[in-house]
Every structure is written in C-alpha cells, then in structure tokens.
Amino acid sequence: MIIRQWVDNKLNLPIEKSFILMLTARFLLTYIFLFTTIHVEAFNPPQKESESEPQSIFLEDGVQLLSDYLKFPSITGNEIEAGQFFEAYCKEKGLHITRFQEDTNSYNFAASIHPLKEGRPNIILMHHIDVVPAGNWDKWTHAPYGGVVADDGYIYGRGTIDAKGLGVMQLMATLELIEHHGKDFDYNITLLVVSNEEAGGRLGAKLVVDEYFDLLNPAVVFGEGGSGLNEVLPSNPDRFVYGVSIAEKKSLWLRLELDLKSYGHGAAPSRRYANKNMIEALSRLNNRSTKIQFETSNRLMFKELGRAEGGARGFFIRNANWRVFNPFVKRYIRDNPLFTSLLTNTITITNIYNPPGAPNQNSELSTAYLDCRLLPETNKEDFVKQIKRKLREPKIEISVLNQSPSALSSPVDGYYDLFEEAILKFDPDVDIIPILFPATTDNSYFRERGVPVYGIFPAKISQQDIQNVHNIDERLSVRALNNGIMVYYFFFKKLLVDQNYPKEGIVFNPNR
C-alpha cells in the first residue's frame, strides 16, 4: 500500500496507467502491426524534408528500382520472377552472384562485393522477396502491384516496407560505398535475398543457412525488425526512437490429440468422452497463472526506455523488473495482450477439431492446436512438459508441428555500437533502443548459429505507415528510403573505411 501511494504521488497517475499504458504498449503495438492485418484508411502527409539531412547519390535509382521491384506480385511461392529481376540488377551493377535455389517454390541468391569463395568475413544484409496477398484491391489508393511513385512523396505497393524497400536500401548503400571508396576492404558485403519468409522461411533462410553457412561466413547479419518512430516517449512525443531488435520470441506449434472410447450416440453420453475431457483440459491450461519473466532482451529494453524517458517515470520503467513492483505489473498484464507477449510465454488455442460426423454422433477423437510463443531463454522441452502437467489429462498426446530455432539475444556491443553511431551520424537527435521482437523472422536462423543479428529498418516511419504493412496502401516515403540508404552507408564507412572495428576485432566465423 505504501509503495502504491508513492507511485501514485510521484508519477501523479495510477500505476496501471503510467509507463505501461503510455509508452511501452504503444512501442510494442507498433511492431506487432508488422504481422497483423488491420484496416486503416486515415492518411498522414509525409514529413517535411530537412535540408540538413544528407542525400544519397543513388536515391533516384533506388526509387526507380523499388518501383519496378514492386510490380512483381511475389506472393509466397511465386518469388522467382521478382528474384530474377533483382538478381539481374545486382549483376549489372558488378556484384558477384551466387544462386542457392531456383524453382517455382523458392528463389534464393547472394549478391556480394567479393566472391564468397574468398572466405572474407561477411556483412550479411538480408531481405525477403515474398509478400502477403494484397487483399481487396478496390480499397487501395494505388494498385498494390503498380509501384506508383505518387505526388505525396510516397512509393505505394505491397512489400514497400515488408521487405523489398529494405533490400533496395541495402543495395543502394552498398553501391554508394563502392562509388566513394571502392571495393578493397577486409570484409565482404553480401545481400542475401531469400524466399518463403512469410511462411516460416523453411524454403528460404533456413535452407540457405543449413546448406551454405560456411560459404557465407557471416560476421554479422542485418535483417528486418524495428524502425524509427515518434509518439513513443510521453515526455517528448515528437522525438524519434529507433528500435533495433536483438532477440525474437520463438514459435512453437503443437497438436493435442485425445482418443477416448465412449458411447457413440449423443443422447446417451458417457461420463467421460473425448470432447468433454479435451475442453476441460484446455480450460485448465487457459486459466493457468501468468508468470512474468524478465530476460536479457526485455530487461534491457525496459532499461533503455527508462533512460530515454528520464525522471520519476523513467526510474520506474528502468526498474520494472524489481520484485517489489511485480504485483502492479502483473495486474496490468492480465488485461493487456501487448505486455503479455513481451513479458510472458503465451499459448493461443487456435483450433479444436473432430472428424466429420453427424450432429448426434459423439466423436471418439478430439484434436486441438496451440500456437505458443516463447521468450528467448525458455527451454522448449521443459515448456511442453509444463503444458502436459497443466492439462492433467494423461491420454492427450502432444506432438510438435513446427518450431522456430532456439536463439538467444544478440550482444549489444561491437557491430550494434557502430550501427548506433551510424544512425546518430544521420540524425543526432534520436534515441536508439534494443528491443525484443514479439514475432519470428528469418533472423532467428542465423542467431541460432551464434551470429550477431540486428533487426532494423533504419528509417523514420510514421505510425500510419507501420499500420499499413500487411494492409491496404502499404507505402514508403522517398525520404525514408534515403534515410535507410544513408544510415547503412555511414555504417559501412565507419566499419570499413574508418576501420572502427568492433571490440572483438574482425570475426571470420563465430563458430570456428
């Protein structure tokens, strides 16, 4: 009670409505929008361009390339034409091509400054070709596969942010580096262009990592993740905050099967029958107590958010993992799915199924499907055992349908530090924060191998633009495209030209 009064007095608002509601929920919600489909029709005009922002000499080329790239409707499973187009462009610009996969279901290749066979430590810049379907075309302002460069300063089309725009940023930054400083570097730079990400990456990043990891020789990987956003800090909503993902939650899809002999007619049900027992077991699982878990990545995220916020509220944010605050944080989490995904392992019952039968026929087989999302440091085998205990139905058989790699957080040093410097070089009046990404991307396949991976779309993006991802009117401003090109270029310059190598020096292969 004393602690609650102190918080209420010092922060001047109830604990449930302090930083949780005003800051981190907004921050996390923004990135969850990358994986959801929400109809949004509101429009925000692009920001005025600052005369102080440097402009890439390849910006015009980048706009044209992205426009052309978007014209290929590369929905998962149909990536080949878009992949061939992007590959041909890279080859025309003098990059060395290594093709890993070429068929109707998958197209994966690398475009490098130096041939991969030279074995140089490699900066991997990864993006995926495939996109989600466009949905209702009639609701789009411009055709979803038109690649329209509109008068409002935006490029419209499915994949502008997720993730063709990222690939164009990475390529143009590489060409900018070559134009200004040549190719004679100790490192290699490789664009890794993959398929199948929207379906889990089995035919894309996973295939490449499993079969060509040694050839790629990755020192560091940059893939999709956070971006620069405003309206994050309550004390300064106009200030932009870049979220660099250093970890992701792990996906674990489970099938529960219960085969229980009983009377077949619904008019005379047994005391125990398959559907009844399955529903009761799922209810016990669904009503389990929620355990808050602060791990390396989410603890660091709270710490850095608190530092950026400052003051009394910042102190509370920085120390939200203190045990004394646990009851207040837990009370809010129960009603907030955003915090649930950030601080707990989640279980979603996505389907309950019986074989086809008549309405009065009592099925002896009941099947349920669970979508589980685990914090990075959770052991999957122990988690499945916990589910088994919570169900309290020994006849339910649990099988794993699909799971993402078990990957711990990437370090916040070395390459991260240099990339942070590059962002601040482009725009010194921003904050950079490491974040836990609440979903799973291709980044996890490299993290599983011990490679440092940073998920970042290095551009200032409006809240509206983020909401349009996987939605109608997906778009990217020309200014944001330039933003991303220049941040990547500054990173290359700091690492390769200024030779500000990370603390650990040049890493030829972290597994050797």
Image (cartoon, rainbow, N blue to C red):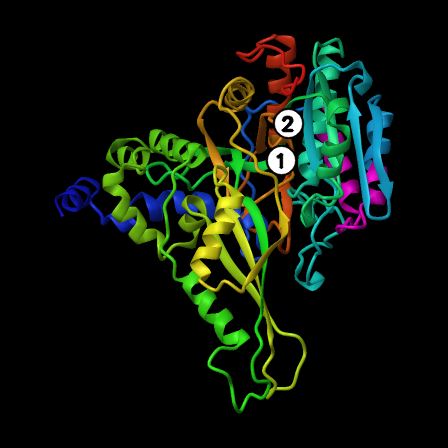
Of the pair 415 and 375, the residue shown nearer to us? 375
- Disc 2 and disc 1 in contact, CB within 8 angstroms: yes
Question: x%, y% of residue 47?
Answer: 53, 39
Element class at badge 1: helix
Kindly identify which numbered label has been placed on residue 443.
Answer: 1
Residue at image point 66% right, 82% down: 357
Label 2 – label 1 distance at C-alpha: 8 Å
Mark 2 neighbour class, 10 Å CA radius: few under 14, some 14 to 19, many 20 or more = many
Near mark 1 (Cα within 10 A), the count class, few <14, some 14-19 or many ≥20, is many
Return the x and y of residue 202 as percentages of the image width and height.
Answer: 72, 44
Q: Is residue 14 left or right of residue 129?
A: left
Q: Residue shown at 57%/30% (left/top)?
A: 454
How many callouts does the rendering have? 2
Is residue 40 in sight in this rendering?
A: no
Residue drawn at the location 82% of the way across and 18% of the way down: 117
Residue 412 image point, x, y percent: 49, 24
Q: Position of residue 491 (x, y in %)?
A: 60, 19
144 left or right of 404 in image: right
Reading the chain from its start, which is encountered first: label 2 or label 1? Answer: 2
Per the rendered image, the range of residues in magenta is 57-85
Q: Which of these two is toward me, 457 or 386?
A: 386
| Residue 452: quarter of image | top right
Q: Is residue 164 magenta?
A: no
Is 334 left or right of 142, judged from the image as shown? left
Give the farthest residue toward the left: 2
Q: Amino acid at mark 2?
A: Val
Mark 2: secondary structure: strand
Residue pointed to by mark 2: 221
Q: Main secondary structure of the magenta part?
A: helix
Which image quarter: residue 86? top right
- Tell me if I can see residue 201 in this picture: yes
| Residue 73 lies within the magenta run | yes
